């Protein structure tokens, strides 16, 4: 079966969309984890190479970042969203902030009774799109 036809939405969260900018990870660390082709294989690099038709055919996107993300994550998401809008102004995309969270805390907050609103927001988005 065609997987793309069955995917109605994607939630992207806390992604390192690229590894360049004023705050950088050590190049040897990035290469050790992601290989020498990380610049073209990272989400931003893949989006750069994608045709406008491919980008326009993406399912709905819900892009979440934590309020207290490291600057590298914030910059990467901003760059990714800007390029996404440039490549396809018609792509159905919504951005959200997980209030009060840092890079790793949202997932462990689920089922804790505190800091779960971001999860409720994702669930509401999923119900509206699926």
Image (cartoon, grey):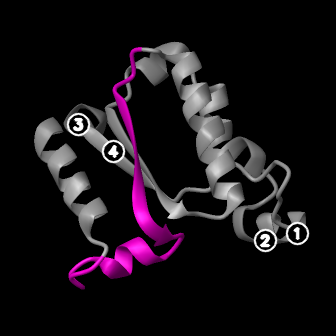
Q: Earlier in the sequence, mark 3 or mark 1?
A: 3
Q: Position of residue 75 (x, y in %)?
A: 68, 47
Determine which quarter of the picture holds residue 13.
Answer: bottom left
Q: Position of residue 63 (x, y in %)?
A: 42, 45
Q: Distance between the residues labelled 2 and 4?
A: 28 Å
Q: How far apart are marks 2 and 3 (CA)?
A: 34 Å
Does the rendering let one see residue 17? no
Q: In this view, does 103 lie to the left or right of 93?
A: right
Q: Which of marks 1 and 4 is nearer the N terminus?
A: 4
Q: How far apart are marks 1 and 4 (CA)?
A: 31 Å
**Which residue carries the number 1 mark?**
28
**Which residue carries the number 4 mark?**
10
Q: In this view, does 57 lie to the left or right of 24?
A: left
Mark 2 or 4, which is nearer the eye?
4
Secondary structure at badge 4 equals: strand
Query: Which image quarter holds the C terminus?
Result: top left
Q: Position of residue 76 (x, y in %)?
A: 66, 47
Looking at the rendering, the stretch of residues picked out in magenta corresponds to: 90-114
Q: Which of marks 2 and 3 is nearer the N terminus?
A: 3
Q: Which residue is drawn at 21% across and 81% down?
A: 111
Q: Distance between the residues labelled 1 and 2?
A: 6 Å
Q: Residues within 10 Å of mark 3 (few under 14, many from 20)?
A: few
Determine which quarter of the picture holds residue 127.
Answer: top left
**Which residue carries the number 2 mark?**
32
Q: Which residue is at the front of the view, 78 or 47? A: 78
Secondary structure at badge 2 equals: helix
**Which residue carries the number 3 mark?**
8
Q: Residue at x 50, y 75 (%)?
A: 104
Q: Position of residue 30 (x, y in %)?
A: 78, 65
């Amino acid at each position: 079966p065609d997987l793309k036809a069955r995917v109605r939405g994607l939630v992207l969260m806390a992604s390192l969309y690229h590894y360049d900018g004023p705050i950088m990870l050590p190049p040897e660390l990035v290469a050790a984890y992601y290989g020498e082709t990380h610049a073209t294989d990272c989400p931003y690099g893949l989006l750069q190479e994608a045709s406008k038709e491919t980008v326009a055919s993406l399912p709905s996107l819900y892009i979440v970042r934590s309020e207290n993300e490291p600057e590298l994550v914030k910059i990467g998401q901003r760059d990714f969203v800007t390029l996404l809008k440039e490549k396809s102004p018609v792509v159905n995309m919504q951005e959200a902030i997980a209030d009060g969270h840092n890079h790793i805390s949202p997932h462990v907050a689920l089922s804790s009774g505190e800091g779960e609103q971001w999860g409720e927001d994702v669930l509401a988005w999923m119900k509206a799109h699926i």
